[in-house]
């Protein structure tokens, strides 16, 4: 299942990408455009806007109306409604490009030395070149959510 997020849901889009979901997000987009994208690319339109949700449904696009204002509740709503299991990111949280696992030596000099010394798992975005590692940002994310979305069904990459 793939998603397209309403303009007001940028944070949710990033969070879902961190949990392995393919989410399109546009900072500016007309409602009709979002409905068009949802239909054409077979994505579920995520929105908090009742009117947009109704328009999407009547245009026969898939859409999920979110109730909460809080991103961590929205994350739960999406996973409950879709029954999707969160996984570790396969898409870049910034640009939705594909993440590719990199060997430690390939990353040397591209991240701060203390990061390179302390971590062994690195991923690079094939689109924007950003580098990710399982470090404090993952721990902070889990802390923020109040639960570990990967706990039950995913082992940490070795
Ligand atoms: Zn990227």
Image (cartoon, rainbow, N blue to C red):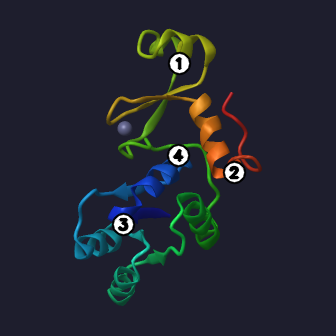
Percent x, y for residue 54? 38, 87
Say what secondary structure mark 2 lies in: loop
- Work out whether mark 2 precedes mark 4 in sequence or the reverse, and give the earlier one: 4
Please report the residue visible at 44 percent of the width from the left and 53 percent of the height from the top.
11
How far is mark 3 from mark 4, CA to CA? 18 Å
Q: Which mark is residue 18?
A: 4
Q: Which mark is residue 103?
A: 1
Most distant residue in the bottom direction? 58
Q: Which residue is labeled 3 in the image?
A: 6
Residue depth check, mark 3 versus mark 1: number of the one nearer the observer: 3
Percent x, y for residue 101? 51, 29
- Work out whether mark 3 precedes mark 1 in sequence or the reverse, and give the earlier one: 3
Please report the residue visible at 43 percent of the width from the left and 41 percent of the height from the top.
92
- Work out whether mark 3 precedes mark 4 in sequence or the reverse, and give the earlier one: 3
Say what secondary structure mark 4 lies in: helix
- Work out whether mark 3 precedes mark 2 in sequence or the reverse, and give the earlier one: 3
Please report the residue visible at 35 percent of the width from the left and 90 percent of the height from the top.
58
Most distant residue in the front direction? 69
Residue depth check, mark 4 versus mark 1: number of the one nearer the observer: 4
Say what secondary structure mark 3 lies in: loop
How far is mark 1 from mark 2, CA to CA? 31 Å
Quarter of the figure that contains the C terminus: top right
Vertical placement of residue 39 versus 140, above or below: below
Q: Using a 10 Å C-alpha cutoff, classify the residue at mark 2 as few (fewer than 14 neighbours), some (14 to 19) or many (20 or more).
A: few
How far is mark 3 from mark 2, CA to CA? 24 Å
How far is mark 3 from mark 1, CA to CA? 36 Å
Percent x, y for residue 39? 33, 74
Q: Which residue is labeled 2 in the image?
A: 146
Q: Quadrant of ligand 1?
A: top left
Residue 74: image quadrant is bottom right
């Amino acid at each position: 299942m793939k998603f397209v997020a309403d303009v007001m849901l940028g944070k949710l889009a990033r969070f879902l990408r961190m949990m392995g979901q393919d989410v399109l997000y546009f900072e500016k987009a007309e409602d009709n455009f979002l409905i068009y994208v949802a239909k054409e690319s077979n994505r579920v339109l995520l929105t908090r806007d009742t009117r947009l949700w109704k328009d999407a449904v009547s245009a026969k696009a898939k859409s999920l109306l979110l109730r909460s204002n809080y991103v961590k509740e929205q994350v739960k709503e999406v996973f409950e409604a879709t029954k999707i299991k969160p996984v570790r990111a396969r898409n870049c949280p910034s640009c939705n490009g594909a993440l590719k696992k990199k060997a430690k030596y390939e990353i040397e000099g591209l991240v701060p030395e203390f990061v390179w010394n302390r971590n062994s798992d690195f991923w690079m975005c094939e689109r924007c070149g950003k580098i990710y590692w399982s470090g404090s940002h993952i721990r902070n994310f889990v802390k923020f959510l109040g639960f570990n979305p990967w706990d039950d069904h995913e082992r940490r990459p070795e």
